[in-house]
Image (cartoon, rainbow, N blue to C red):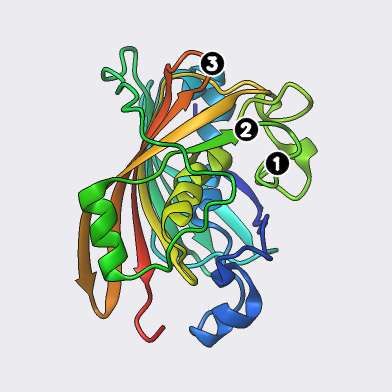
Amino acid sequence: MIENWSATAFNQDPGSDNQIHGDELAQKYGFEGGLVPGVTISAYLTHPAVAHWGEDFLQRGHAHVKVGSPLYDGEAFRVVIDEQSGSAYRARLLRGADVVSAEASVGVTATPPGPPERRGDALAERDYTPPRSSSAVWQQLREDGCKAYLYHWGGAHKMASYLRDPAAMPGLLRGDNACANMSFILGLSNFIAAGNAHMNPWVHLETRSQNYRAIAPGTDIIAEMAVLDLFEKKGHGFFDAEVNLFDAADDQCLTTIWLRAIHHLAGS
């Protein structure tokens, strides 16, 4: 049985360039304080999957996570399993007086869909400074393509633990031989988006992901991104993007991610 789970929220990056994760700017937009990253909330909802399926989830697991309301550093939360089968579950993340912060459908599949191949997008130069986010910039990225980025997975990364106490992470996700966790993996979709258009503030809302290989320590990762859609709603500017992660050593796909985010908050 996949079990309910509870913990205390941890904001790994309160000093992020995206200042919505810091108290000052977040409070200007009406939040109580800096937001715990959406990718970290996603990791909380997939934590039961790693605890139950272990490496199988990191190699062929999938997840659809929608973040609906904020979660704050130090706040107690519960992940409640609403439905489950031998290969999937549906869950909600509850905070405070049972406020639903996020929902997810998570599972493993015996045969994942065929993985994409690398396009060979040009890698961003080490000193590359992305243009400031605007509707025109996002349209240009949609039409002309995005820069790829090279990342590295290792235990010293700021996203190495989604819990304040790393010792409380599942066994596969802690210690010197820790595989990459979903906060880091999904976080790469955030990093490459911000690497193509400088956004401050912006808000991660939803991801669909499919894992193809556990990411071992020392792995160099190439991320490629394509902008799929742009739209506005209630004064906010949204983008949908596809981000594919590849092992730089052999070009094999590690994870695919579909991301939806707000690149422009109404009033900013």
Q: Separation of disc 3 and disc 2 at Cα? A: 12 Å
Residue type highlighted by circle 1: His
Residue drawn at point x = 42 percent, y = 60 percent: 197
Q: Is residue 230 above or below residue 82?
A: below
In depth, the one of 92 and 235 nearer the eye is 235
SS at badge 3: loop
Q: Nearer the viewer, mark 1 or mark 2?
A: 2
Residue corresponding to mark 2: 152
In depth, the one of 58 and 81 nearer the eye is 58
Q: Nearer the viewer, mark 3 or mark 1?
A: 3
Q: Is residue 251 left or right of residue 129?
A: left
Q: Separation of disc 1 and disc 2 at Cα? A: 9 Å
Displayed quadrant of residue 212: top left
SS at badge 1: loop
Badge 3 or badge 1: first in the primary sequence: 1
- Pointers 3 and 2 in contact (CB under 8 A)? no
Q: Which mark is residue 249?
A: 3
Residue type highlighted by circle 2: His
Give percent across and percent down for residue 202: 44, 67
Residue type highlighted by circle 3: Ala
The answer to whether residue 4 of the structure is visible from this angle is no
Q: Is residue 256 left or right of residue 96?
A: left
The answer to whether residue 77 of the structure is visible from this angle is yes
Residue drawn at point x = 55 percent, y = 71 percent: 20
SS at badge 2: strand
Q: Separation of disc 3 and disc 1 at Cα? A: 20 Å
Residue corresponding to mark 1: 157
- Pointers 1 and 2 in contact (CB under 8 A)? yes
